Image (tube, helix red, strand yellow):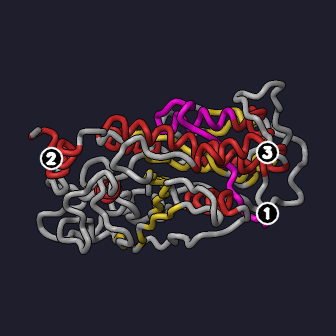
Amino acid sequence: MEAARDKYNIFPPSSTFAVSKPPVAVSAAITAPNLFGAPSVVKDAPNPFALGFPVRSKVNDQVKKEMISTKVSGNLGSGEEMDVSTQQMTNGSFKFGTPSKLESPWRDVEWTEARRSSLMKTVSSHRPSCNEMTETRVLLLGPVGSGKSSFISSVQSVFNGRVTNRAMVGSSPNSFTKKSFNIRGQKGEDVPRLVLCDIMGLSEQEMTGLTLHDILSVIKGHVPEGHKFSPDQPVRPETEGYVKWPGLKDKIHCVAFVVDASKILKYPKGTSTIFKQLREHISDLGVHQVALLTHIDQLSPDTAKDVTHVYRSSLIRDMMSKAGELLGMSTSYIVPVQNYASELDVDVNMDVLLLSAVDHIMQYADLYFQDHTGKAETDIFEDMA
């Protein structure tokens, strides 16, 4: 147990983890080492979560229309290359070519109103498989702009029956707030006992962003709702509203990583290592993880027009594999989603894809409850460490 205490001590020596530039030390006992590694002493080190190119950009009219085949470095920390023969690359941005369409889908989905209704019923009637719990708490983690907040709004739109946008967390790199969203349905209807937690994305900017210490504090249930994170003020027992003895209702029951499919090939070198180390720390807390692959419509023109083509796209399938390599997880944990953006009305097929993702998340959250049922005393003792 001493080893466990040393491993999860809230403030071991050099315990404030930063993405790039070190935060200001809060006291002499709290230093500022780099995220997942040695103390950050290199001021100009590139941020490992800096994203490489814009999602969409205007393509010069002079660009040739014919499809090109080019080797583009995956830059996922392993040095492998990927053949992007189905798209043009213009100034680092994707331009649609003619993606190959598979004869058979690589995952079977029933794209019908009946399937949507079935998923709605399944998700709405879901209850945590633990008597003392009334809701499932899920933390969304991913780079800025990956689609976390849009996913929350899209799921809420499904249950509202119309496209709505919830209040967003914001993108200020110096101050950001923990916000939890209870998914609500229309009056008189059953609603899922689901809470989606949104915090600042892993920073694109050359500054601190989220720290490992604060991420783990959220997952362990120490961080109060509405807490404003700041790079130079890590969460600690003296923090206002700090939850000293979190119960299961305060903790995160599943973590969903959110990755932008259109940017996977441009993540900086070393990002894969950081994601994998982050996953290792979360796994040590007994929390299961899944992943959402967003912005799939920006990879495939067919899918952009009709989301039912998602599992017939060879490019999306390949990007799923790349996402698995990036995160260090099997593609069976990863599901593609298309968030509502410019739409005014909900769509049956987009709802099916979104509800399938929610159902996927809830299944892994249930594993957490199964693992922790009857372990309340042990959990409390571990939180003392």
| Tag in front: 1 or 3 | 3
Provide the secondary structure element on which disc 2 rests: helix
Q: CA separation, marks 2 and 3? A: 48 Å
- For disc 3, the marked residue is 113
| Residue at position x 69%, y 42% in the image | 118
* Mark drawn on residue 345: 1
Residue 251 percent across, percent down from the top left: 33, 53
| Residue at position x 32%, y 67% in the image | 224
| Residue at position x 57%, y 31% in the image | 331
Q: Are marks 2 and 1 in contact (CB under 8 Å)?
A: no
Q: CA separation, marks 2 and 1? A: 49 Å
| Mark 2 / mark 3, whichever is N-terminal | 3
- For disc 2, the marked residue is 381
- Say above or below: 249 vs 228: above
Give amino acid for label 3.
Glu
What are the residue bounds of the magenta stretch?
A: 317-344
